[in-house]
Image (cartoon, helix red, strand yellow):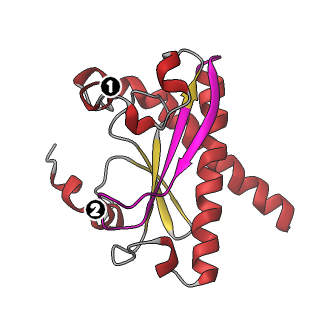
Amino acid sequence: MTEDWRRDRIGAALAGANPTVIARLQESFAAIGDAQLLPGYCVLLVDDPTIGQLTDLPRPRRLRFLDSMDRLGEAVSAACREHDSAFRRLNYEILGNTDGFLHAHVFARYEWEDAAHVGLPVWRYDPDSFYGETTALGPAHDPLRRSIRRHLDEQRHEDVRLDG
């Protein structure tokens, strides 16, 4: 598989060519992270590559993006809880220091993490460990990915029941 989608993750998502995309949400795409040191790590990508930061969105779109971040977090939390009894909590981050497009990180955190990392941001992990070959997204993560997708789908069905 070509890695071209990595150079334009949002364009590839819009074209249906970003293999990390789990689901289309309001103002965004839910994608599983390339690195799975912390299984369930996901990224919410804005659906317009010209949006550089949250405040670039008009308030109604901003609130929909944040709602999507919340929904993705809810799905990640439920899926991780099912797949690992040591799931502890979620961390949410909107940074924007490296990539020039709006995106939000949703990190699962676990009881099995080294005590030196528990109280720190995920970015304090050694990059070679975080992005290493043994933590790269692969087929072993498919069950967790499917579970996140299932929980996102269940939210949609719940919304329909509440609206109808």
Q: Amino acid at mark 1?
A: Thr
Q: Nearer the viewer, residue 112 or 146?
A: 112
Tell me which residue sits at (15%, 54%) in the image.
4
Q: Nearer the viewer, residue 42 or 89?
A: 89
Quarter of the view holding residue 136: top left
User: What percent of the width, then of the height, locates residue 114?
Assistant: 48, 16
Q: Secondary structure at mark 2?
A: helix
User: What percent of the width, then of the height, locates residue 124?
Assistant: 39, 34
Residue named by callout 1: 135
Quarter of the view holding residue 102: bottom left
Would you say the residues marked 1 and 2 are in contact, meaning their CB atoms lie under 8 Å apart?
Answer: no
Would residue 151 be found to the left or right of residue 102 on screen?
right
- Neighbours of disc 2 within 10 Å: few (<14), some (14-19), many (20+): some
Q: Which residues are magenta?
A: 84-108
Magenta includes 7?
Answer: no
Q: Amino acid at mark 2?
A: Ala
- Neighbours of disc 1 within 10 Å: few (<14), some (14-19), many (20+): some
**Residue, far bottom:** 58
Q: Secondary structure at mark 1?
A: helix
Tell me which residue sits at (56%, 48%) in the image.
92
Residue named by callout 2: 12
User: What percent of the width, then of the height, locates residue 111?
Assistant: 60, 18
Q: CA distance from mark 1 to mark 2?
A: 23 Å
User: What percent of the width, then of the height, locates residue 163?
Assistant: 83, 68
Question: Is any atom of residue 157 visible in this view?
Answer: yes
